[in-house]
Image (cartoon, rainbow, N blue to C red):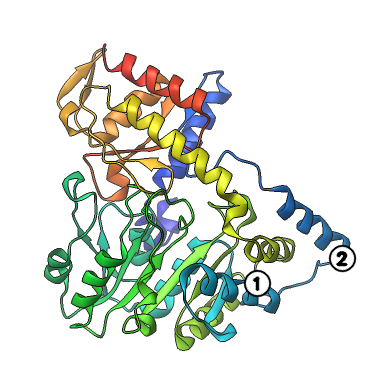
């Protein structure tokens, strides 16, 4: 059968997060009590004011094809959001609405990368970055970070990674999977390096922007000398608990936005009409409307850190955003638990699934093989039970 398939698909990795979620569902189907801490999906319901807007859109007979780059009213709401929350000024021609932020990223890669163009990826990075780059015939260049630098790339590391073939740098802040947040000062230091290399564009993935427990969010495009070289990607999946609604958006230089619109027109066309109308309402509201979710995530973060720090072999930074912890578990490598040898994070993740019935994701999928990604987008009761199971499984 593989002879029938393209090299493109054969060379593409399966999303590790989705694969673990599928395995967890399979085990649940067998009657096993699996606690899922693998998916980046809030366990909250979409707020009622957003659901009501969707119901109104149905009643108002929004059922036709949408403009490829989004309804004009939604683009205006996105412009207002960028100005209000990020001090970024965009025009409608610079905005493209897509079927999730993931499609925004794919559009950007497909319209900017040629064969052999290099894309710098600070590790850890979101699981799909590398394969999206490869699909677009680009070359991922991993820059390793560690818990000692809060999993953030330094200016010196960035400078060392740049070659004549470097076309872009991709990063997320707050970061999936580490929860690390780049401050305005840290972004400025990276921008200072990039000023010496005007051919390099930046993809700033800000999907977790509002789930921030520290001093606020900073955008790379806020710097005047980086504005025309930055593509800002965002969406509503995380902050508004709208993962299944599949709406993402980007703000970019006009030429790049036009190219993304052209690409999208040949692949999916415009995003869902009802979801778009609901997102207009979501973005026109103050972020304070969903602050209750952020407050709960912070409580859960503190809870899971306290519990994980009680397990020998787990070393955690303090994530300032998103809803993940990314413990370094390399101290456990080479040890045997209940007759199972754990040689790496992948072994540990599978052992915890089978022995503790807790689904996590190996850090190898995010470019850091010493770690596990654990989502705390679950109830406090589930977090307590899951970590108890993990601790018990590692005492065997």
Check contact, mark 2 vs mark 1: CB within 8 A. Answer: no
Task: Identify the residue at image location x=18%, y=51%.
Answer: 149
Q: Quadrant of residue 189?
A: bottom left
Task: Please identify, in this view, whether the residue under mark 2 or under mark 1 is nearer the observer.
Answer: 2
The answer to whether 369 appears left or right of 87 in the picture is left
Q: Relative to 167, say whether 274 is above or below.
A: above
Q: Residues within 10 Å of mark 1 (few under 14, many from 20)?
A: many
Q: CA distance from mark 2 to mark 1?
A: 19 Å
Percent from the top left, x then y, of residue 67?
Answer: 68, 78
Q: Relative to 358, say whether 284 is above or below.
A: below
Percent from the top left, x then y, of residue 235?
Answer: 54, 62
Residue 270 tag number: 1
- In the picture of the structure, the residue carrying the numbered disc 2 is 60
Task: Identify the residue at image location x=26%, y=22%.
Answer: 311
Q: Quadrant of residue 342?
A: top left
Task: Identify the residue at image location x=64%, y=72%.
Answer: 77
Q: Relative to 111, say whether 161 is above or below.
A: above
Q: Earlier in the sequence, mark 2 or mark 1?
A: 2
The answer to whether 169 appears left or right of 389 in the picture is left
Q: Residues within 10 Å of mark 2 (few under 14, many from 20)?
A: few
Closest to the observer, 58 or 194: 194
Percent from the top left, x then y, of residue 64?
Answer: 79, 71
The answer to whether 51 appears left or right of 22 in the picture is right
């Amino acid at each position: 059968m593989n002879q029938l398939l393209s090299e493109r698909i054969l060379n593409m990795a399966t999303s590790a997060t989705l694969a673990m979620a599928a395995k967890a569902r399979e085990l649940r189907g067998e009657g096993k009590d699996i606690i899922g801490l693998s998916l980046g999906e809030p366990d909250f319901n979409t707020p009622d004011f957003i659901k009501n807007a969707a119901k109104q859109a149905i009643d108002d007979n929004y059922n036709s094809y949408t403009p490829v780059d989004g309804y004009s009213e939604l683009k205006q709401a996105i412009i207002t959001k960028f100005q209000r929350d990020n001090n970024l000024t965009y025009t409608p021609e610079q905005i493209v609405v897509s079927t999730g932020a993931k499609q925004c990223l794919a559009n950007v890669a497909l319209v900017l990368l040629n064969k052999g163009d290099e894309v710098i990826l600070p590790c850890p990075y979101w699981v799909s970055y590398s394969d999206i780059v490869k699909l677009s015939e680009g070359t991922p260049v991993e820059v390793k970070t560690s818990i000692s630098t809060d999993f953030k790339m330094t200016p010196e590391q960035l400078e060392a990674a740049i070659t004549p073939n470097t076309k872009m740098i991709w990063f997320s802040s707050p970061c999936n999977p580490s929860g690390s947040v780049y401050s305005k000062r840290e972004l400025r230091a990276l921008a200072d390096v990039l000023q010496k290399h005007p051919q390099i564009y930046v993809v700033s993935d800000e999907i977790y922007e509002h789930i921030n427990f520290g001093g606020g969010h900073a955008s790379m495009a806020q710097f005047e000398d980086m504005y025309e070289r930055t593509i800002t990607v965002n969406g509503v999946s995380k902050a508004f608990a709208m993962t299944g609604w599949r709406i993402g958006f980007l703000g970019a230089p006009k030429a790049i936005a036009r190219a993304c619109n052209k690409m999208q027109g040949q692949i999916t066309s415009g995003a869902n009409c009802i979801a778009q109308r609901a997102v207009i309402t979501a973005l026109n509201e103050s972020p304070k409307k969903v602050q209750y979710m952020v407050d709960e995530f912070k409580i859960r973060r503190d809870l899971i850190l306290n519990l994980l720090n009680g397990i020998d072999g787990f070393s955690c930074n303090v994530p300032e955003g998103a809803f993940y912890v990314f413990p370094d578990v390399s101290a456990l490598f080479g040890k045997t638990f209940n007759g199972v040898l754990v040689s790496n994070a992948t072994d540990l993740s599978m052992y915890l699934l089978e022995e503790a019935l807790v689904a996590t994701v190996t850090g190898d999928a995010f470019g850091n093989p010493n770690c596990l990604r654990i989502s705390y987008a679950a109830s406090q009761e589930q977090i307590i039970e899951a970590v108890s199971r993990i601790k018990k499984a590692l005492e065997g």
